[in-house]
Image: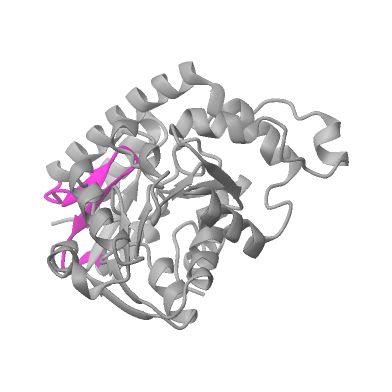
Amino acid sequence: MLEHGGRLRRAAKEYGIPLERWLDLSTGISPFGWPLPDIPSSAWRRLPEDDDGLAEAARAYYEAPHILPVAGSQAAIQALPLLRPASRVGIIAPGYAEHAHAWRRAGHHVATQPVDILLANLAAWDVLVLIHPNNPGGERFDLDELLSVHTELAARGGWLVIDEAFMDVTPQGSMCRYTDRDGLLVLRSVGKFFGLAGARAGFVCATPALLEALQEQLGPWTLSGPTRHVLRHALADQAWQLQARVRLVEASERLGALLARHGWMPAAGCGLFQWCRGDDASRVHGALAERGILTRLFDAPPSLRFGLPPDEAAFARLDQALAEVLP
């Protein structure tokens, strides 16, 4: 199992600090989650049904011609490599490590490289996996450039896979609307923007033939009835979505400014996190953890990702901790 953020219980045991005293900034999950509705008993007592309106709500929200609900984008990340013969796969680095792990485990030839190297050598890949915006590196891509990359890959039966788990704050940058093209696949997650990580839900946008093959691989009932009920309403709540985007951008900009004041200028970020590079990242991570603040540590390159503090008290606490930790 690869390392991920959010391992709060483990940190509580390791540092001897009670769970309730932690400030968890180790994930990119919004602390301002969509307000949960009451869930009808029928959602618990009946098997989920595909014609409940969720697919229609998701197609409208993502502006996608075709869509498949899945148990988080992680489910698709693990299953998609099983739908191709052995391929040469280029994956953006640094990035979400589960992509490379899944393609290697399925027997593909995988290279993880900075995006400029990947794009300069398109002929080397049968499959190109990008994260947009990247986590944690923050890279963003021009839509016309991505469409050009896809055209070249698709001409020889290749795929362009784009993980848009952090795209919801800036939906105008999404490639979902173009996924009626063969070989273009976009993965979306509701865990980050909607603050619904525990629902384990996401969507894949692609052509019907590819979605049918993926659904066959995943099997029936990929999402529970209660999850489908919640998502159907969350995806349709346009007023909340507009307010959330403004709030997230403001909080992220404030976080970036706070880090910069302490000499840690963010190298990248988006509306859900800020990423800081530094040779002493491991020391800072440990020192903050000793103060009950959990961040996400990356080894290559040495860096920390900071999620958004949820309120004024959390911002003040992080400010004080950084003053104590950073020279």
Judge by depth and name the residue closer to the eye, 246 or 161: 161
Looking at the image, which residue is at 28% across and 62% down? 153
Q: Give residue 291's position: percent from left, percent from top.
A: 38, 55
Looking at the image, which residue is at 35% across and 33% down? 169
Left or right for 255, reference 231: left
Looking at the image, which residue is at 19% across and 62% down? 115
Q: Give residue 254's position: percent from left, percent from top.
A: 24, 33
Image height of 213 relative to 192, above or below = below
In which quarter of the view is residue 193 placed?
A: top left
Can residue 17 be seen here? The reply is no
Q: Residue furthest front?
A: 155
Whether residue 140 is in magenta: the answer is: no
Q: Give residue 98's position: percent from left, percent from top.
A: 43, 67
Q: Give residue 47's position: percent from left, percent from top.
A: 83, 45
Left or right for 133, reference 206: left
Can residue 293 be seen here? The reply is yes
In which quarter of the view is residue 9 placed?
A: bottom right
Whether residue 270 is in magenta: the answer is: yes
Image height of 146 relative to 316, above or below = below
Chain part drawn in magenta: 262-281
Image height of 242 relative to 313, above or below = above
Judge by depth and name the residue closer to the eye, 141 or 124: 124
Judge by depth and name the residue closer to the eye, 252 or 174: 174
Q: Residue furthest right?
A: 45
